[in-house]
Image (cartoon, grey):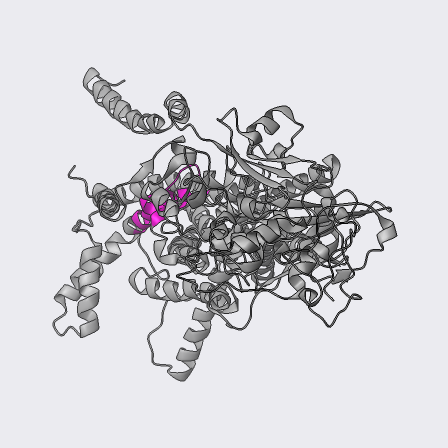
Amino acid sequence: MKNHVWRPLYVAICIVGIVLIARAILVPKDYGTHEQGYMYGTHRQGNVEEWKAVTVKYKTSEACKDCHGDKYADIKGGAHAVIGCENCHGALMEHPENPPKLSIDRSRSLCLRCHSKLPYSASGRGSIPGIDPEKHNTDSECVMCHSPHKPVIPGSENPKPEVKK
Amino acid sequence: MVHGELWTIKEFFTYPNEYIYWPITIVMYPFVTGLVAGAFVLSSLYHVFGVKQLKDIARFSLVFSFALLPVAMMPLLLHLSQPFRGIEVMLTPHFTSAIAAFGVVFSTYGMIVASELWFVYRKHFVLKSLELKEKTNRSGLDSIFYLLFSALTLGAYDISEHALEKDEKAVGKLAAIGIPVACFLHGYVGFIFGSVKSNALWTTPLMPVIFLCSAVVSGVALCIVTYVITVGLRKLLYIRKRTQHPDSPTDESVKDVDLSEIKITTKYLVMFLILAFTLEFIDLIFRVYTGIKSWDILQVVIFKRDFVKVFILQYGIGNILPFILLLLPGLTVKRALLASALVLYGVFMMRWNVVIGGQAFSSSFSGFMEYHMPILPVSLDALKEGLIGTIAVIVTPYVLFFGLNKIMPVFGQTDSH
Amino acid sequence: MMNRREFCKKAMVMAGGLALPLSAFELFDPKSLHAEKNDKSNTRWVFLVDTHKCVGCGFCVKSCKTENEVPYDANVTRTWVERYVITKDGNTYIDSPKGARDGFTTTKIDQQHEGMKDINNEDITKAFFVPKLCNQCDKPSCVQVCPVGATYRTADGVVLIDRKWCIGCGYCVQNCPYGARFFHPVYHVTDKCNFCYHRITKGMKTACVDACPFGARQIGNLKDQNDPVTKIIMTDRVNVLKEEYGNKPQAFYLGLSKEVK
């Protein structure tokens, strides 16, 4: 087409060409529509493996049992049996290689998560024994009087939480 | 601070992850694309519909529309938390998303405006190129301009009557194709908001149309404002030069603003203003009437918390007041200028009330979020999406226009188009 | 009137022009899409929350943050617990201080900028806790609106985010009706709960399910008829959040009260 009128169109086509070349170079080969179709499944396939490769930090209480059998038995025999070790001691990670010691959280705020009394009858929270954190021994840590591993001795005549003398 | 935390104040109950994630930059983006679309439509009124009296303002608004185009991208780049990956919208657009249309629409529109400008200024490029070729003692700057103008001719040096007629025909065709593309450039932004079913304020099929009408309104108003100010400044500088140096050459192109052109332009402004206002009014009436679940919290936002911003600033000062000013008899250039400036402000407030207003309430419908635009650049976020970023966006089109005017002069052209 | 040659020329141009947009329909052919969706995967992850059992201890939030490397002090979280306190005068007070990262240790309701609200215990008619997380929707509106395909749904029903591809526009965050998504303060891309994909694909449970001492959270495979979670979903009275949005969320709730937002 000899008409000069088409020249801007040629420029436009060149620009589109450059974008297509850039796409071929810059976009990873595994990008495309995979399972779940175009709307919900267009992505870079390699990303799925990247997510699967994330390190696992929490290993559950079963991983603690072999080396800390006594503590495990203590806690599993009482009212705190349902609480995982890692909830209070932090994630296992690669313990004992790394970290060599897990933290022991002795703060009031840890216990208050469940034992700050909230009188909600429609919720399980209402039936957990608790105290008013602003009134009950406000200057002490809970663990000074209460044992977190053996809070209640099951079957005992004394239903109150064990208080150390 | 997480992204959004710096400028969001949360009240009552909001989901923990809720912040105002789309701040001032996302208010600026539809505002600027609206100006782009509106300026183009104004220019097309001359090229397509042959409203001969709009010739000067048409040329001006075409060049200004082109200067605004890169500016439209600025708020987006400032907003993206991974701006260097922004090119992915061009490379891997996921077309079920309205935002993916950005790459295609933006490029298409850019190429149409660039092509139209080429046809309008081709003769000028050829003349300048030949003139600089003849020049014997070219300075460094002259050489650069020579290369630039030669390249811009795209090798088409024929400026006979026949060739220029072809140019004019091409301009007409491009302007005609360009109108729906310009409409799409801004309509899709309305779709971006209107299609968000999770946002009770944004979700309405009217959104693309509302945005479009107010876009045309803002584009026309901006052209009136900038045109009047630019022509006025030129005259001022010319008079001062003539007073200080009475021997300097006269310039016939310096004149007052043509009132008849302004009058016709404001007619179109009023028409679209009525349309935009009506659509927004209908939307509000329907919400009040149907009273669905989200209305409880929305009415607190619209009628209480944002009452001044919506009814006084946007509808009152930004719509009704300029409407009255433009309809009163005996329209002067000054009054048209004031009315246009108020309209621009009204359109900006509309964008603000939609974007920020839509994030002023929690998706839980049980709490509110207040937006405070960062003034001082206390962090990178505050710099990009705060006052500094906004000022940069406002200033840049004028800087670009100044530069473009050197290559594609807007004033004093005497050719056929 | 055009002659035959002109007609042929114009017809070819038209056919060529039409072929281009028509070819786009190939991408969107509903039948082939459906065939792809009838997935070969024998896993479809679903979540079950029992709001009766949740006590608001917040161990789930704490373990999630550590397991999924969301900075502990950042005010964003992949999962959270909401507290609902309904009073005799018909008001509903809701809070989630730090997403319940530290649990709920006071009867006062955290109203953020409006301060702490004292509630008299005698005024409470009902109060409960609601754990929330990404619902891994069947038709996720967040995935639909990603402009670059950085977020997607896997064959086994989990919605993931490609950290290397996300441009950070935030459209997905705006489109989630549940507030599950946020910007990760370290990677500066979006983030959300992904059912601890790195754990469930190894046969483990999610961190929050393991952490919950009361069994309020459970994860299961809907395609396994013998899965206890599947059995509950199929036989008990379960509900989902915000069904009206059409996202088809895959997190099911027992005891979802009408006040829950």
Of C114 and B34, nearer the camera is: C114
Of C223 and A31, nearer the camera is: C223
**A11 left or right of B299?**
left
Residue extending farthest to the bottom is B244
Q: Residue B304, how many percent across, how many down?
A: 75, 54
Residue found 32% across the figure and 57% down from its top: B414
Q: Residue B186, how many percent across, how many down?
A: 47, 45
**B152 left or right of B297?**
left
The answer to whether residue C169 of the structure is visible from this angle is no
**Residue C103 falls in which quadrant of the image?**
bottom right
How many numbered callouts?
Answer: 0
Q: Residue C121, how many percent across, how many down?
A: 84, 53
Q: Main secondary structure of the magenta part?
A: helix
Q: Is residue A1 magenta?
A: no
**B82 left or right of A10?**
right
Q: Quadrant of the C terminus of chain C?
A: top right
Q: Is residue B89 magenta?
A: yes
Of B11 and B333, nearer the camera is: B11
**Residue A17 falls in which quadrant of the image?**
top left
Residue range in magenta is B88-117
Q: Residue A139, how many percent across, how many down?
A: 73, 72
